[in-house]
Image: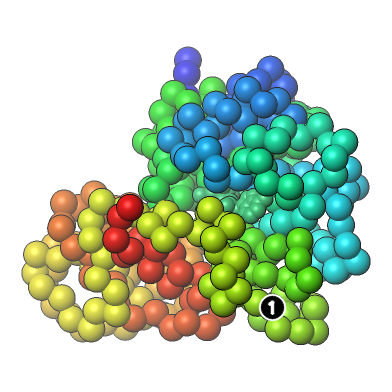
Amino acid sequence: MQGRIVPANAEWIEEAGHLIRSGALVAFPTETVYGLGADATNGEAVARVFAAKGRPSFNPLIVHVLGLEQAVIIGSFSATARRLADAFWPGPLTLVVPRIETTEVSELVSAGLPTVALRSPEHAVARELLKSAQRPIAAPSANRSGHVSATRAEHVAADLGDNAAVILDAGQTPRGLESTVLSLTGAAPVLLRPGAISSEAIEDILGEKIVRASESGKHLTSPGQLRSHYAPDSKLRLNAEIWEPHEAVLAFGPIAERPAKAIINISPSGDLIEAAANLFAALRRLDGSGAETIAVTPIPAHGLGEAINDRLARAAAPRD
Ligand code: TXA
Ligand code: MG
């Protein structure tokens, strides 16, 4: 009965809430990608998440909450942090803030850092699970460390198998790209990970430019930004205008007709939102095609293109 995919209906969400409270791991859909959830206040359950992920234990996890009321007893929210939560929660913005000393959230969640990452998901199944569990839920993306994120229940099962007691299946996740991670622990907001909410949208609310971690040198303290984090087994060749018949192709927008081992166009019409939703599933399928190389056609860098290109650059980076 381990690791089974179950429908995300009221009965199973109720059962999943009990499982979380009992220290088990539950994989669940969010609007971004599937998460592998554990009771954030239960250190052993959190440790099992790291074990299941095969993730280096210094990589901290996001704590999922219903909203600001639950968040402010875990992390310390400045006026800026509140403004962003008001604007984007529930939704795919993760805010890294100072931990409150009295929080019941396990320190393992923060991997020893004096900060905590919080987000309020908007997916109805994630919200119902949070209500049923009555606990903040620590959840990384439900893939093995170094693999691409899972956007379908079957991807979770393939990557994590029996590590999740149940996998709540609600089909494909709508956004298909992880949340944007913004640090509010220094003098100015720092973008630690581009994601489903664009930098421009955040800058509109703040009325100022945000600093990219890559510009501030802060990436050294954000272990999630390890260059080879998002790594398929195949090699990636970026900005490929043409390709060889033995290569697999991840395409975007209108492309030339040319033979290839496999071709997936993540948005034939050139829509970055559609492309984001299809990205990880396409990478997985192409990675499984047996081709040594995946040629990736050029993808524009604006809007969600920043996050897509960021993921692809990581996937293409040399392995540690
Ligand atoms: O969309 C998402 O964010 C998904 C869904 C499940 O919510 N979760 C997700 O979690 O992508 P994960 O663990 O794969 O990525 C969390 C990112 C990592 O880059 C991690 O380093 C960063 O957030 N992070 C978490 N806590 C942090 C902290 N205290 N300081 C700096 N970075 C932190
Ligand atoms: Mg991840």
**Whole-percent x, y for residue 186 in the image:** 76, 66
Q: Is residue 5 left or right of residue 189?
A: left
Residue sticking out furthest to the left: 245
| Front-lying residue, 261 or 183 | 183
* 151 sits to left or right of 124: left
* Residue at image mark 1: 210
**Above/below status of 118 relative to 307:** above
Report the residue at 72% width, 32% height from top: 106
147 sits to left or right of 303:
left
At label 1, the amino acid type is: Ile
Q: Nearer the viewer, residue 315 or 189?
A: 189
Mark 1 crowdedness (10 Å alpha carbons): few <14, some 14-19, many ≥20: some
Q: Is residue 24 visible?
A: yes
Which type of secondary structure does the marked residue at label 1 adopt?
Answer: loop
Tell me if residue 265 comes above or below residue 23 in the rendering: below
Residue 159: image quadrant is top left
In the image, residue 251 sits, relative to residue 292, either above or below, namely: below
